[in-house]
Amino acid sequence: MNNYEVILIFHPGNSNLVAKLVEKYVSIIKKYNGKIYRLENWGRRHLSYPIKKFHKGHYVLLNVKVYKKTINMLSNKIRFDENILRNLIISVNKSISEKSPMMLVKDFEKKIKKNK
């Protein structure tokens, strides 16, 4: 089994469907004995450049450990999902379970808002 980092950018108009769509991919990973080490919903964020005339996208990060066959199947399903603007699947050396810098910033922002 190999470790992968998967970043998905969803269509901004479908932010309310993101949980269902992510659950679909999580169920595929679990069905084929994969492990999910990190699942982070980064929310709607500005894109660096417009994609299909959209300036925002809903970001989701997954760190998983799956077989190559499973990641190929997952990649194929993601490629043909019209709700996903962009995706990135990269192989990583080890499984990562700690919070990403993006989530640390979001937690810090929440803490600041709470203290005001």
Image: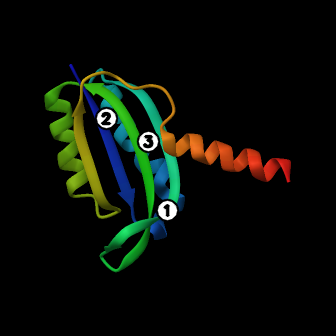
Identify which residue, 32 or 103, lies in the foreground: 103
x and y percent of residue 99 in the render? 51, 33
What is the three-letter code of the residue carrying label 2? Ile
Front tag of 2 and 1: 1
Q: Which mark is residue 111?
A: none
What is the three-letter code of the residue carrying label 1? Arg
Is 58 left, or right, of 2 in this rendering?
Answer: right
Q: Earlier in the sequence, mark 3 or mark 1?
A: 3
Q: Residues within 10 Å of mark 1 (few under 14, many from 20)?
A: few
Is 45 left, or right, of 88 in this rendering?
Answer: right
Secondary structure, mark 2, is helix
Task: Name the residue: 43% across, 48% down.
Answer: 60
23 over 13 or under it: above or below: above
Residue for badge 3: 23
Identify which residue, 99 or 82, lies in the foreground: 99
60 over 62 or under it: above or below: below
Secondary structure, mark 3, is helix
Q: Locate the C terminus by quadrant.
A: bottom right
Q: Residues within 10 Å of mark 2 (few under 14, many from 20)?
A: some
Residue for badge 1: 45
Q: Earlier in the sequence, mark 2 or mark 3?
A: 3
Considering every residue shown, the one lying at the far right of the view is: 116
What is the three-letter code of the residue carrying label 3? Glu
Identify which residue, 12 or 5, lies in the foreground: 5
Q: Earlier in the sequence, mark 2 or mark 1?
A: 2
Q: Residues within 10 Å of mark 3 (few under 14, many from 20)?
A: few
Is 108 left, or right, of 72 in this rendering?
Answer: right
Disc 2/disc 1 C-alpha distance (Å) = 26 Å
Task: Name the residue: 37% across, 57% down.
Answer: 9
x and y percent of residue 114 in the render? 81, 48
Disc 2/disc 3 C-alpha distance (Å) = 9 Å
Residue for badge 2: 28
